[in-house]
Image (cartoon, rainbow, N blue to C red):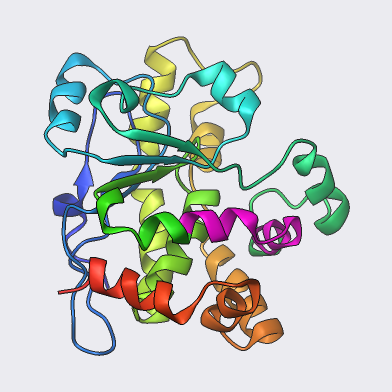
Amino acid sequence: MIHDYSERHFAFEGCFNFRDIGGYPTKEGKKIKKGIYFRTGRQDRMSEKDLAELKNLKISTQIDLRKPEEILDQGKGPLENMGADYINIPIIPDGGSDQLSRLVGDTGISGKRYLGYLEFGPESWLKIFEILANKDSLPVVLHCTAGKDRTGVSTAFLLSVLGVDRDLIEADYKLTNLDTERQAEFIENSGGFPEGVDREAMILAAGVPEDAMTVFLDGVESRWGSVLGYLEEIGITKNQMNAIRDNFLE
């Protein structure tokens, strides 16, 4: 379904799963503007060549979805030093990983686990959409550690607001699996795999299950009717959604 992966993907040497959602069509016949929303993983391992390319994107805002302990371990990355506003919006709060396991079991990455994110309350999504509704915040980089789970859910919400077809939302999510071998190779060459983890296991861990976004969106639709129904219920206004569409669509 998505045939331009090589064009929207930035194959940075030390950053993975970095891609532009620009160019996707909407059901109303519009397209998402290019160069205003990038989804990715951590950026703290970028090379000098990467940094030069990243600077050319002229990012205004970095939305960091990681927990404080992840940031302490990995660092914020280079964008703040390039002039971007840095905003930390943890999708999973302190103690949240254990709470997720109690809620959904030790499922690993799954659509059921993604649904558990919604049990932490609406504050994170409200903050994210407030930023996206502000034209001065763009271009934006939104990321977590791997750029696939918390980033994937947040991006699915945005694409839903923009009117992108659900099949395309699910296909965008699964593009993560096209950058896992590069990531495994980087880890192997820069310190080696953790004890007990081989290349195949690392590739699997870096990717996403084929059905996770499907299960997540099915769950949202079953409970709230639609993604927009959920977002409206938690307090994201029609004016905000319209402002986001004005900002992102051409």
Magenta stretch holds residue 26: no
Magenta: main secondary structure:
helix
Residue 90, percent from left and from top: 60, 42
Classify residue 198 as left or right of residue 35: right
Classify residue 153 as left or right of residue 100: left
The residue at the point 62 percent across, 28 percent down is 68
Residue 81, percent from left and from top: 29, 20
Query: Is residue 232 at least partly visible in the picture?
Result: yes
The residue at the point 48 percent across, 48 percent down is 148
Q: Residue furthest right?
A: 102
Q: Quadrant of residue 46?
A: top left
Residue 54, percent from left and from top: 19, 31
Residue 94, percent from left and from top: 75, 36
Start and end of the magenta stretch?
Answer: 113-128
Classify residue 116 as left or right of residue 152: right
The residue at the point 55 percent across, 39 percent down is 205
Magenta stretch holds residue 124: yes
- Name the residue nearer the viewer: 233 or 91: 233
- Quadrant where the N terminus lies? bottom left
- Quadrant where the C terminus lies? bottom left
Q: Quadrant of residue 147?
A: top left
